[in-house]
Amino acid sequence: MFKITRSEELSQNEFDFWIDAPRIAKKAKPGQFVILRIDEKGERIPLTIADVDAEKGEVRLIFQVIGKTTAALSKLKKGDSLLDLTGPLGMPTEIENYGTVMIVGGGVGIAAIFPILKGLKQAGNRVITILGAKTAELVILQEECRQYSDELIITTDDGSLGMKGLVTEAMEQVIAREPVNCSWAIGPSIMMKFCTLTAEKHQLPIYVSLNPIMIDGTGMCGGCRVTIDGSIKFACVDGPEFKGSEVNWDEFISRMRQYQPEEQASLSDYQKAQVNQHG
Ligand code: NAD
Ligand code: FES
């Protein structure tokens, strides 16, 4: 059992948990993820490790409620436990000194990009971070990201904080202003696709983190297959990070949409059952 030691609601639909998991906290590197199961009947869901507290032996998981399992997870509080937490899984980010790097986080993807920017800053890079969200209250981890960034640019779709517009517009402004050696983008698939197109236009290398459906997380089930540079890869063992320019975005985006109706139906059934149970 893995105890929740701290829990906070970051916004209406986004939650921040610290979990007691000393072995995972000791080994986890930026870019890696865990697979969790709430209870015996629960499905297994992957979540990127947003941070580790090596001293306390805790890992930080930040998630958005999108289906039944994340809705059930959001009901847990400090002191509750998860049945399983497996990890760290996946290939870590290649952290080295590239020079100037650009880090782009969109919505809840900001949680997944945070350990990468922290690692790159600690490796001596000049870090320019762009955080984008629909509105001000959804720009999470601002202070943590600022702490490990030489420059922090915020964009919101509605203009309620920072620059009004998309993260790709901020990318263009930075690229026009100064040379950048490497970049990373994590957020909705459509954002990662357009960040890739923007980076490609300027011959800027870009890495993205793919989050397809995952089941076993060990390369056995094939659920997380993606096409990279024309070959089949498994995001759980070969990724989740890949070069953006090698991802078959149309296939990835269509596979991500494939299970949305089932996900929404199971969330709606869960919410109805909760109302019936608690009135
Ligand atoms: P969102 O829809 O609010 O988008 C965040 C930002 O992405 C926007 O503010 C905008 O700047 C940018 N964006 C969106 N569409 C764009 C486009 N067409 N061109 C350029 N920029 C665009 O984000 P959300 O609602 O918080 O959703 C977060 C998503 O991130 C979820 O779909 C989740 O699955 C995904 N996610 C991915 C990972 C991962 O590891 N890949 C991790 C966590 C979350
Ligand atoms: Fe099964 Fe990746 S989750 S192969």
Image (tube, rainbow, N blue to C red):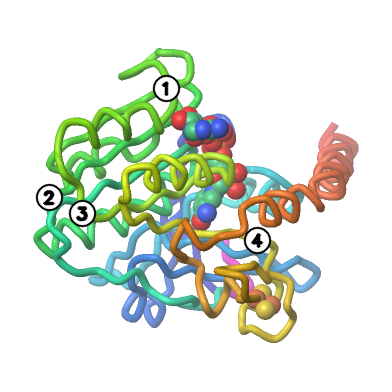
Query: Which residue is outermost to the left?
Result: 124
Amino acid type shown at disc 1: Thr
From the image, tell me which residue sits under label 2.
126
Q: What is the distance, in whole Å, between disc 4 and disc 1 at their CAs?
A: 26 Å
- Identify the mark nearer the N-term, 4 or 3: 3
From the image, tell me which residue sits under label 4.
212
Write the residue at 81% across / 52% down.
Answer: 259
Dot 1 alpha-carbon crowd within 10 angstroms: few under 14, some 14 to 19, many 20 or more: many
Judged from the image, the secondary structure of the residue bearing numbered disc 3 is loop
| Residue 51 coordinates in the image, percent (x, y) | 34, 60
> Decide: marks 4, 3 in contact (CB < 8 A)?
no
> Decide: marks 2, 3 in contact (CB < 8 A)?
no
Q: What is the distance, in whole Å, between disc 2 and disc 4 at their CAs?
A: 31 Å
> Decide: marks 3, 1 in contact (CB < 8 A)?
no
Frontmost of labels 4 and 3 is 3
> Decide: marks 4, 1 in contact (CB < 8 A)?
no
From the image, tell me which residue sits under label 3.
181
Write the residue at 82% across / 39% down.
Answer: 271
Q: Is residue 128 above or below residue 123?
A: above
The response on whether ligand 1 sits within 8 Å of label 1 is yes
Give, as a single range, the part of the protein colored magenta: 80-84
